Image (cartoon, rainbow, N blue to C red):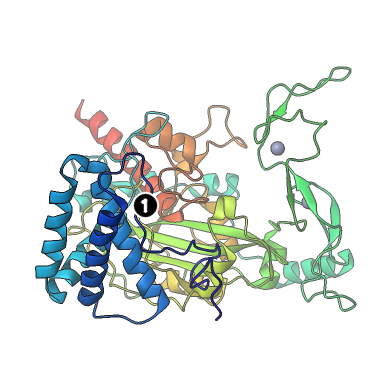
Amino acid sequence: MSLTAKSFDSTKTSKPVVRQTLNPRLIQRSPAPHGQRLQYLQILQTELTRLSGNPKGDAATQAIICKCLDLEEDIALKKREIYRQAMGKLCMRYKKATMEDYKKELDEERVKATPAPVVSPTSKAGLENAKLPLDTGLPKPTELTRLRDFVVGVETLKKHSYILTPPTAAEIEQARAGVEAAGGYETCERCTQRFQVFPGRRISDGALTTGGTCTYHHGRKAGPRSTPGTISEAKWTCCGGVVGFHNGCETAPTHVFKVTDPKRLALQLPFSKTPPNPNIKTERALALDCEMSYTTHGMELTRITATAFPSGKIVIDALVKPYGVVLDFNTRFSGVSSEMLTSASPWRPTAPYPDVSSTELINPTTHSPPEKLGIFASPSQARKALYHYIGPNTILIGHALENDLLHLRMCHEAIVDTAVLFPHNRGLPMRNKLKYIVQHFLGREIQVDGGDSGLKGHDSAIDARCAAELCRYRIKEAEEKQKV
Ligand SMILES: [Zn+2]
Ligand SMILES: [Zn+2]
């Protein structure tokens, strides 16, 4: 790699980095003449080079120069009155130091520079994410037993669009004929335009979709609906544009679609009922949340998270390689990006299923970025891993879990759904958003894009734990009512 005058090691950063020379930084009121400041810098450079083991190479030299400049500047600014004394002391300390001492110092600096798991103590809305998990006053195994009281009945599951019976072979065949007849035409989920999809790419030019770019609003319509003869005053929540007058505030390279018909979904991966699991000896419950992205097969699973109840300890947290080619990662919501999928290594189970009594409760809104997420080779592999930890009677907790189970093609009846536990006051099909229930009942804030954690999109671990915490809220409430 050739070095230009202005940059070094361009492999590590996309922006050219200004090349530093051992020249005292310009500050408003210099604490000493230039020559003297330079002298101190030269001593520092000699000592730090020695302490670093006389490294070769431009990057190492630059790192040392930067450190010298930072150290000197810090003293020049903060200890101006006693500059000479402070610099003399610093130089002496490094002269006396051994390589071992210096290594220790660097390690300590590194620890300080690594941000701790971010919990925003008080959000803009005044909600407290740092507070402890709820205290139900019940032992953890009892919480698990009480959770059974909130299992949703089969009829309610059906009303909430849960698929409890896999589509039949005849139904799937019918769906196949329908798909073939449609010639790849779909309706865009975002802008409603009709377009064509070529899951195997169009032979003539390799295209995946037709219809060009997609211009749309990512927000929802809010405000009064238009009535005949009047102009709508409804506005888009994303940009404030008047509904009907603004085409869209965002443009994406392609249109996208979503398949919700189970018969058609079964063409990709057949549905299955959770199989019996002889390994599960005691009661258990898991909170589940999945993230989806748009692909040439519609909307597909790209991340799955399952946490143990009530602790919130991660059981599975992994990316999923979808069957189709990704058209849009939907990162705003899914938090999943192309880089994440391409750089992930295969998922491996890390620890045995956590013991219910001895596992500490995790703060449900802690965003602790996983080291690096593993990846499942397909949605079917993700489901197989989940089946390893659950049986047909294992309670699955989640918010509007019918959608997650639909994309996992799972028929599961032991469900505690927070959309059912905290229903919308206008009833179905209206549903409260998880974000709203968490705010209202737990006083915490989630799904804030680019919040204090710098998080993009939703974090399925937080969403799963919050759904579980809402169940604990209902358990606590029931317990308190009983006492009265
Ligand atoms: Zn908009
Ligand atoms: Zn579109």
On the image, the x and y values in percent for residue 414 come to 43, 56
Q: Is residue 418 above or below residue 69?
A: above
| Count of marks, rendered view | 1
Q: Quadrant of the N terminus?
A: bottom right
At 36% from the left edge and 73% from the top edge, which residue is drawn?
A: 61
**Residue that badge 1 annotates:** 25
Q: Is residue 54 left or right of residue 325?
A: left
Residue toward you, 279 or 321: 321
Q: Quadrant of the C terminus?
A: top left
Q: Classify residue 20 by image quadrant.
A: bottom left
At label 1, the amino acid type is Arg
On the image, the x and y values in percent for residue 419 come to 49, 41
On the image, the x and y values in percent for residue 269 come to 63, 72
On the image, the x and y values in percent for residue 70 come to 31, 55
Instruction: Report whether the residue tagged 1 is closer than 8 Å to ligand 1.
Output: no
At 86% from the left edge and 54% from the top edge, which residue is drawn?
A: 194
Is residue 313 visible in the rendered image? The answer is no
Q: Classify residue 232 by image quadrant.
A: top right
Q: Classify residue 109 by image quadrant.
A: bottom left
Q: Is residue 83 left or right of residue 1?
A: left
